[in-house]
Image (cartoon, rainbow, N blue to C red):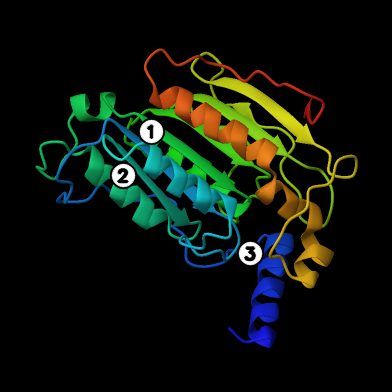
């Protein structure tokens, strides 16, 4: 991509974030597919959503790296995939297909009850992860965990309230810059959803060096990008996912070290 075109794309992404405009056509509610292409039903499903206009196969970005690493660690039994945040419809249909164990084109109560789904995302991707959970709620499909990293709400979405089909949810954010994450998430039904925490990362106190970023990204959204490449955040995200993919997983997040500070 030419430098001028790349600059224009980043500027458009920034402008859309600031104005709350959708980056592309979104899907708020999607009907179940009529037929399934899933060959073998996975025991667990992990779906990540990248932020901005990041491509779902751009290995320079940590959410994509995490998905690839998890696929290497869990080559069988777990379906793991990253989607662009404006491809919610594709992600939703794919998950329904994977849950359709008998491939009859419909989800039975048993197939829904057995779902083990983890959703995570950064920026617009975090907002889309919550919207994905809300779409699954309409089909009465449970979600084990949602993880939001510096969540930026897309137009038409609500990344602040976690739907009651989610068992656990956690939010990591930083408060600085033109683009910054949501500071607080709450549960629509606290008796069904445990908010593990709203955790503040202060990059003014402890900055993170992000490689392979352009000068204009560093100028316009430096701290937001730091949340995307911060190894302290993403190692915790990975640990939480791995715990819930393993038998006898422990619930809750145990902060360690001075880098992580409880939010509101």
Residue ID at (82%, 26%) = 258
Q: For this view, does 140 lie left or right of residue 22?
A: left
Q: Is residue 54 shown above or below 138?
A: below
Question: x%, y% of residue 152?
Answer: 66, 50
Residue ID at (47%, 39%) = 119
Question: x%, y% of residue 156?
Answer: 56, 53
Q: Secondary structure at mark 2?
A: helix
Q: Is residue 39 shown above or below 177?
A: above
Comparing 263 with 136, the one in front is 263
Q: Residues within 10 Å of mark 3 (few under 14, many from 20)?
A: some
Q: Secondary structure at mark 3?
A: loop
Comparing 134 with 236, the one in front is 236
Question: x%, y% of residue 263?
Answer: 78, 28
Provide the residue designation for mark 1.
117
Q: Residues within 10 Å of mark 1 (few under 14, many from 20)?
A: many
Provide the residue designation for mark 3.
21
The Cα atoms of the two marked residues, 1 and 3, are separated by: 28 Å
The Cα atoms of the two marked residues, 2 and 1, are separated by: 9 Å
Query: Which is more N-terminal, label 3 or label 1?
Result: 3
Q: Nearer the viewer, mark 2 or mark 3?
A: 2
Query: Which is more N-terminal, label 3 or label 2?
Result: 3
Provide the residue designation for mark 2.
95
Q: Residue furthest right?
A: 205
The Cα atoms of the two marked residues, 2 and 3, are separated by: 26 Å
Residue ID at (46%, 44%) = 69
């Amino acid at each position: 991509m030419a430098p001028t075109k790349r600059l224009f794309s980043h500027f458009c992404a920034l402008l859309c974030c600031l104005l709350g405009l959708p980056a592309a056509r979104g899907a708020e509610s999607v009907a179940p597919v009529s037929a399934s292409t899933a060959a073998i039903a996975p025991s667990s499903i992990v779906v990540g959503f990248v932020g901005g206009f990041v491509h779902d196969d751009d290995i320079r970005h940590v959410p994509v790296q995490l998905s690839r690493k998890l696929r290497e660690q869990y080559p069988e039994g777990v379906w793991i995939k990253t989607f662009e945040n404006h491809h919610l419809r594709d992600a939703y249909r794919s998950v329904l297909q994977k849950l359709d164990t008998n491939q009859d084109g419909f989800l039975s109560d048993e197939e829904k009850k057995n779902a083990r789904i983890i959703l995570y995302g950064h920026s617009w991707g975090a907002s889309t992860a919550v919207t994905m959970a809300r779409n699954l709620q309409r089909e009465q499909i449970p979600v084990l965990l949602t993880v939001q990293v510096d969540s930026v709400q897309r137009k038409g979405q609500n990344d602040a309230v976690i739907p009651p089909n989610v068992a656990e949810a956690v939010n990591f954010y930083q408060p600085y810059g033109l683009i910054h994450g949501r500071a607080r998430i709450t549960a629509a039904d606290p008796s069904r959803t445990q908010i593990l925490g709203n955790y503040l990362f202060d990059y003014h106190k402890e900055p993170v060096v992000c490689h392979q970023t352009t000068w204009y990204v560093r100028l316009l959204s430096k701290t937001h990008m730091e949340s995307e490449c911060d190894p302290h955040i993403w190692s915790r995200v990975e640990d939480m996912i791995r715990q819930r993919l393993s038998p006898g997983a422990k619930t809750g997040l145990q902060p360690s070290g001075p880098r992580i500070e409880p939010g509101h």
